[in-house]
Image (cartoon, rainbow, N blue to C red):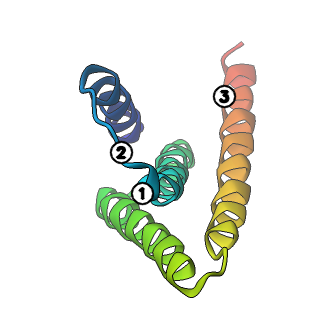
């Protein structure tokens, strides 16, 4: 099932490059944090797949709920005049790098078992 998040990531990048979508400047902070949350979910899905406990319903619901929650947090912070998006950047950034490190470790372990 590792192919679901990878195909989704490739499809999203491809569509982003093909379609010339312009995001208004006032929404750029919301989009950036939503993209970070989405990437966190994708790499979490890849990690779960490598650890053999991937569940597509958890992946899909996490993708949308994390993305919407992060964008909502950025919006509420903007309305309050507080940089709440920094909390989301920190949380998702830490999780993203932890997932990437775990994926790297799991792939290296699988590589050692093959050789």
Of tags 3 and 1, the one toward the viewer is 1
Residue name at image x 47 percent, y 52 percent: 28
Frontmost residue, 11 versus 34: 34
- Which class describes the residues within 10 Å of circle 1: few (<14), some (14-19), or many (20+)? few
Q: Which residue is mark 1?
A: 27
- Which class describes the residues within 10 Å of circle 3: few (<14), some (14-19), or many (20+)? few
> Residue 72, how many percent across, how many down?
43, 75
Separation of disc 2 and disc 3 at Cα? 41 Å
Q: Are marks 2 and 1 in contact (CB under 8 Å)?
A: yes
Q: Which residue is mark 2?
A: 23
User: In what quadrant of the picture does the C terminus appear?
Assistant: top right
Residue 87 falls in image quadrant: bottom right
Check disc 2 and report its element: helix, strand or loop.
Answer: loop
Residue name at image x 72 percent, y 47 percent: 97
The answer to whether 20 is drawn above or below residue 51 in the figure is above
User: In what quadrant of the picture does the N terminus appear?
Assistant: top left
> Residue 67, how many percent across, how many down?
42, 63
Residue name at image x 69 percent, y 55 percent: 93
Q: Is residue 32 left or right of residue 60?
A: right
Separation of disc 3 and disc 1 at Cα? 42 Å
Name the disc covering residue 50, or none: none
Tell which circle, 3 or 1, labels the residue nearer the N-terminal end.
1
Q: Which residue is mark 3?
A: 110
> Residue 95, how many percent across, how many down?
67, 58
């Amino acid at each position: 099932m590792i192919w679901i998040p990878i195909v989704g990531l490739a499809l999203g990048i491809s569509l982003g490059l093909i379609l010339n979508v312009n995001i208004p400047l006032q929404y750029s902070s919301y989009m950036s944090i939503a993209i970070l949350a989405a990437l966190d979910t994708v790499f979490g899905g890849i990690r779960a797949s490598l650890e053999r406990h991937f569940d597509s319903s958890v992946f899909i619901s996490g993708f949308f709920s994390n993305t919407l929650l992060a964008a909502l947090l950025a919006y509420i912070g903007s309305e309050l005049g507080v940089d709440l998006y920094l909390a989301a950047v920190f949380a998702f950034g830490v999780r993203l790098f932890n997932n990437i490190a775990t994926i790297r470790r799991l792939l290296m372990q699988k590589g050692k078992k093959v050789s």
